[in-house]
Image (spheres, rainbow, N blue to C red):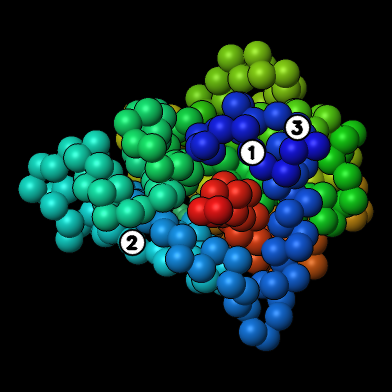
């Protein structure tokens, strides 16, 4: 197997093969050993240049990309859109062309518009990693989620993964579905009818409006963030009602297999889609996901930049 990714960009797990996903996960195993050392620094990407370009807020994704670059000795900069010339009306393409002219080789972009990273990738020769585009995909979150499942369960094939919550708005759900399906997991979605489009069944997954049915006998329960900022169209009567019918609680988690893993991409709305009791409980892998997010981003940097050294 060739030890690199086929495309110069990572825009979504819909475009990536099962072999490539496995390559990223296997590479992340080695990277995690570096993350767990006291001195977390190797010279692998010394002199390589990375830009973080985030048009939406982020804690986990942006920090993980920044730390991943530091641990591999790459030089990374971040453009905060609020204090950049983007506020003066500079286009995405112009911003990217300018930083590319300064020598940036890889651009990590989060953008509220689905497809923005694809547009960028077509217009620069630098590699582009999608760090979340609108309601489309969040491929590195999908990879770190799958990595965390494989780490705890030893496999992906045949796992029953329940994805619960605001499916419609979730780029995390879409990337999980694409990646998990390619590796042979059985996926069931559950959430309110207004936030669970029937068309999702076209992706080869099951769905039910009964959260109990979805969680019953699951190996993994992946709870999505209720995207309160995107609920202005009256999808929900109230947050209290959401919690009552769709919130994942200790009682509902008990319907899953006894050793089921509880996951959440963050940031959590405690007391709405998930209770603190289980988020901080022994089945929770939520902080493992965060640690693994650094290893996954290191693996991607290594695979996307590592093979380009000047001879
Ligand atoms: N999971 C995730 O994307 O978190 P952030 O929005 O904090 O990056």
The answer to whether residue 7 is left or right of residue 123 is right
Spatial separation of the CA atoms under disc 1 and disc 3: 11 Å
Q: Which residue was labeled with disc 1?
A: 5
Q: Residue at x 55, y 20 (%)?
A: 197
Q: Is residue 94 above or below residue 154?
A: above
Instruction: Say which of 235 and 141 sits in front.
Output: 141
Contact, mark 2 vs mark 3 (Cβ under 8 Å) = no
Spatial separation of the CA atoms under disc 1 and disc 2: 25 Å
Q: Which mark is residue 18?
A: 3
Q: Earlier in the sequence, mark 2 or mark 3?
A: 3
- CA neighbours of label 3 inside 10 A, class few (<14), some (14 to 19), many (20+): some
Q: Which residue was labeled with disc 2?
A: 78
Q: Earlier in the sequence, mark 1 or mark 3?
A: 1
Instruction: Say which of 221 and 82 sits in front.
Output: 82
Instruction: Say which of 105 and 165 sits in front.
Output: 105
Quarter of the image containing the N terminus? top right
Q: Position of residue 178 (x, y in %)?
A: 66, 29
Q: Is residue 306 visible?
A: yes
Q: Position of residue 174 (x, y in %)?
A: 59, 32
Q: Residue at x 44, y 41 (%)?
A: 128
The answer to whether residue 24 is left or right of residue 69 is right
Identify the secondary structure beneath mark 2.
Answer: strand
């Amino acid at each position: 197997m060739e030890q690199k990714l086929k495309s110069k960009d990572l825009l979504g797990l819909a475009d990536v093969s099962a072999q490539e996903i496995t390559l990223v996960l296997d590479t992340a195993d080695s990277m995690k050993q570096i993350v767990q050392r006291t001195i977390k620094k190797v010279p692998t990407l010394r002199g390589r240049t990375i830009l973080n370009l985030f048009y939406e807020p982020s804690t986990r994704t942006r920090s993980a990309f920044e730390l991943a670059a530091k641990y591999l000795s790459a030089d990374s900069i971040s453009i905060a859109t609020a204090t950049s010339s983007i506020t003066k009306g500079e286009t995405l393409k112009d911003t990217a062309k300018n930083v590319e002219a300064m020598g940036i080789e890889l651009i990590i972009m989060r953008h509220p518009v689905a497809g923005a990273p694809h547009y960028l990738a077509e217009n620069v020769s630098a590699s582009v990693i999608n760090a979340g585009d609108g309601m489309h995909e969040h491929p590195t979150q999908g990879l770190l989620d799958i990595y965390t499942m494989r780490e705890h369960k030893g496999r992906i094939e045949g796992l029953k993964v329940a994805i619960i919550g605001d499916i419609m708005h979730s780029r995390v759900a879409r990337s999980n579905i694409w990646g998990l399906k390619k590796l042979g997991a059985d996926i069931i979605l559950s959430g309110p009818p207004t936030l669970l489009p029937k068309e999702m069944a076209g992706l080869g997954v099951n769905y039910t409006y009964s959260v109990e049915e979805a969680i019953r006998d699951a190996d993994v329960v992946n709870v999505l963030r209720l995207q309160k900022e995107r609920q202005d169209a009256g999808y929900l009567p109230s947050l209290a009602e959401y919690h009552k019918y769709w919130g994942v609680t200790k009682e509902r988690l008990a319907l899953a297999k006894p050793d089921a893993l509880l996951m959440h991409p963050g940031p959590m709305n405690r007391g709405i889609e998930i209770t603190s009791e289980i988020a901080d409980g022994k089945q929770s892998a939520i902080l493992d996901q965060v640690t693994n997010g650094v290893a996954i981003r290191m693996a991607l940097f290594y695979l996307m930049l590592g093979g380009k050294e000047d001879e």
